[in-house]
Image (cartoon, rainbow, N blue to C red):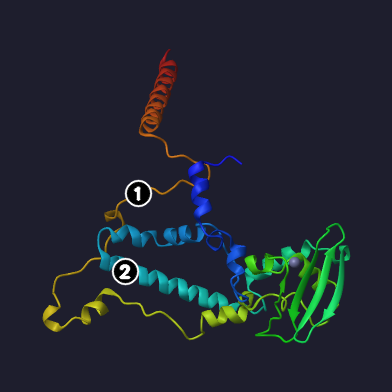
Amino acid sequence: MNMDDKALRYLNKVNDHEQYPASRCAMGDDIYMYGRSSSSSAEAMNKANSMVRERHAVDCVNAVLLWLKLEKTRYEEHRTTAWEWNEVLTPYAKKKCEVLFRNVNHCLYNISILQHAERFVFNVKRHDSPTMRTCYFMKEEVKGSVFGGCSRSFPKTHALQCHHVIAVVKSTRITDLTMSNCMPYWWMTDCWHEQYPVNSGIEYLDMETLMNTLPEDQQTKNPFRYCPPFAAPNKRGRPKGMARIPSPIEKSSRKKRKVMDKKRLETVVESLMAEDDAP
Ligand SMILES: [Zn+2]
């Protein structure tokens, strides 16, 4: 591996639990990690709130009002979507689950059941793999889920079932085990509903309400204005995909080329018209 000495020295100094998800999950039985996707979620929120960030440079009050309004709209949209969904798993979990189940053929696994007082414990081994894994399910449903784990770290680092567990579910050795109750509670619609209670909402303050909260002697008769979008600085973000921001020289040469093309077209049109006019 080609790595800079400085980078290697730095990485060797960082603790394992700060660097590897599996090590962080090993710090406790109830620690799971999921939805890790580098900085994309932070970038998405940056983009969603870009209107606020632009106006923030001009007027903080305007920016905060707009921010509350955006949050309110988003919250209400999510609440409606959550309560319109009637299936056991959330749409995202359902999609993930279908992909995982589609890719496992349970006929390729050796599965043996080891009973346990409060769990179903299995020894699972894929025919073409030398490693035997031990996975388990809870016997009693906790909030509709019997999600357990595996001696492989995948369920803890991804909060999803690994292929050993899926093979057990698909083998139908345990009748009450289904595609939905083997998933963790946080992938279920009930959990989603808890995040967006049905009668909840965000109070949005408009400028007038905000003004009325001031004591009378501080209320001004000056008209107030919302910050228009063009007042904010217009800074370009990182371009999508492989696109590159052209340098000023490239920009000017492109502009020149366009002018030249236009002039050339004009001369062609002029000469054609001249030909037409000719007797
Ligand atoms: Zn496994």
Residue 247 shows up from this direction = yes
> Are the residues at dot 2 and dot 1 in contact (C-beta closer than 8 Å)?
no
Q: Residues within 10 Å of mark 2 (few under 14, many from 20)?
A: some
The front one of 162 and 130 is 130
Q: Which residue is mark 1?
A: 235
The front one of 207 and 14 is 14
Image quarter of the C terminus: top left
Name the residue located 14 percent from the left edge and 70 percent from the top edge: 222
The front one of 1 and 199 is 1
Secondary structure of the residue carrying numbered label 1: loop
Name the residue located 53 percent from the left edge and 45 percent from the top edge: 241
Residue 46, placed above or below residue 33 = above
Mark 2 close to ligand 1, CB under 8 Å: no
Residue 97, placed above or below residue 3 = below
**Among all residues in the image, which is located at the extreme left?**
217
Image quarter of the N terminus: top right
> Which label was assigned to residue 64?
2
